[in-house]
């Protein structure tokens, strides 16, 4: 089985594949102070509760945007799974995905591993011009051409960051829950106005960025790329967008599986 690990700034998502079937996925808060020993204790409990035999894990692939956590995970995986692994633990970087996707940016080494993973997963499924939007701590827009070239994108503050800024940097605006939409777009009180601003505002911003990014990609406002959303906040926001084709919560984990199989098959 293949153990896939996506280490983000706010959350770490792990999954277990048996060939192409995802047997399970788990989401935890990313603790930057977590050590390899701490991971051992934490995941020993998870494996025990779910009946997973660690010796059945024959491959591990990691994508990380948190260097300190990447080091802890890599150390733990090498220490606790070395006896069952068929190949060394694979840590995704622009160097080991060059044979899968062309990276046409000024500094390919600066592109986050998660962005490359999402781009590869989306292109593998659709093989067309794509904009992949990841709703994480930051919201990233990643542009992928039909011939599998990653050409860049846009980065903006995530929804949670914006909501936290409103509540902490203003005197009278409260923390709010946006899981329940406002009754109407024109807010009749502070909380409704904030909900409307976040939900409809981000939805409109998404559509606006998709239009201008798509026009630059294709040269036409009438030939917009397919838009795929992923990340923890995707399902919350896409009802307020008219241009997102679908949400795929498994996109990053699927991309990790594709990269692992391609790298070691070709290697």
Image: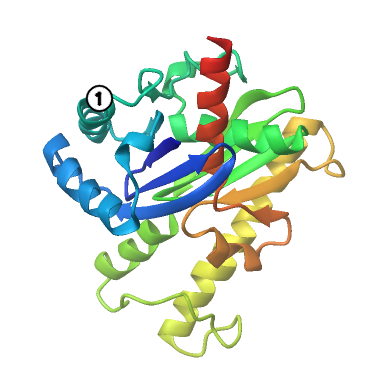
Residue at 45% x, 29% y: name it: 113
Would residue 30 appear left or right of 98 to someone viewing this image? left
Would residue 67 appear left or right of 140 to someone viewing this image? left
Rendered image quadrant of residue 205: bottom right
Tell me residue 186's x, y (percent). 58, 83
Q: Is residue 229 above or below residue 117?
A: below
Residue at 73% x, 61% y: name it: 242
Q: Is residue 146 above or below residue 137?
A: above
Residue that badge 1 annotates = 78
In this view, the residue in front, 11 or 24, is 24
In this view, the residue in front, 170 or 114, is 114
Number of callouts: 1
Quarter of the rendering occupied by the N terminus: top left
The local crowd at label 1, few if under 14, some if 14 to 19, many if 20 or more residues have their Cα within 10 Å, is some
Residue 2 visible in the displayed image: yes
Residue 135 visible in the displayed image: no
Tell me residue 90's x, y (percent). 40, 22
In this view, the residue in front, 32 or 72, is 72
User: Mark 1 falls on what kind of element?
Assistant: helix
Residue at 27% x, 23% y: name it: 82
Residue at 75% x, 22% y: name it: 147
Rendered image quadrant of residue 149: top right
Tell me residue 210's x, y (percent). 68, 46
Tell me residue 172's x, y (percent). 28, 79
């Amino acid at each position: 089985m293949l153990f896939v690990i996506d280490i983000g700034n706010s959350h770490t998502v792990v999954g277990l594949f048996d060939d192409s079937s995802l047997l399970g996925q788990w989401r935890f808060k990313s603790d930057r102070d977590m050590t390899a020993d701490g991971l051992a204790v934490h995941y020993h409990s998870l494996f025990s509760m779910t009946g997973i035999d660690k010796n059945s894990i024959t491959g591990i692939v990691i994508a990380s945007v948190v260097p300190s956590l990447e080091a802890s995970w890599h150390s733990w995986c090498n220490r606790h799974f070395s006896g069952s692994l068929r190949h060394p633990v694979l840590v995704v970087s622009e160097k080991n995905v060059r044979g899968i996707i062309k990276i046409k940016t000024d500094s390919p080494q600066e592109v986050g591993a998660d962005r490359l993973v999402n781009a590869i997963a989306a292109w593998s499924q659709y093989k067309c011009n794509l904009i992949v939007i990841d709703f994480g701590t930051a919201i990233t827009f990643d542009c992928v051409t039909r011939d599998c070239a990653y050409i860049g994108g846009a980065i903006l503050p995530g929804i949670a960051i914006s909501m936290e800024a409103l509540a902490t940097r203003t005197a009278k605006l409260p923390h709010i829950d946006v899981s329940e939409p406002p009754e109407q777009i024109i807010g009749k009180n502070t909380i409704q106005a904030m909900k409307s601003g976040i939900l409809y505002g981000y939805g409109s911003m998404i559509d606006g960025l998709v239009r201008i990014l798509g026009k630059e990609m294709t040269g036409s406002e009438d030939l917009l790329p397919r838009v795929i959303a992923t990340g923890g906040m995707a399902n919350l926001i896409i009802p307020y967008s008219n241009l997102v084709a679908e949400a795929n919560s498994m996109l990053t984990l699927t991309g990790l599986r594709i990269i692992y199989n391609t790298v070691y098959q070709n290697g």
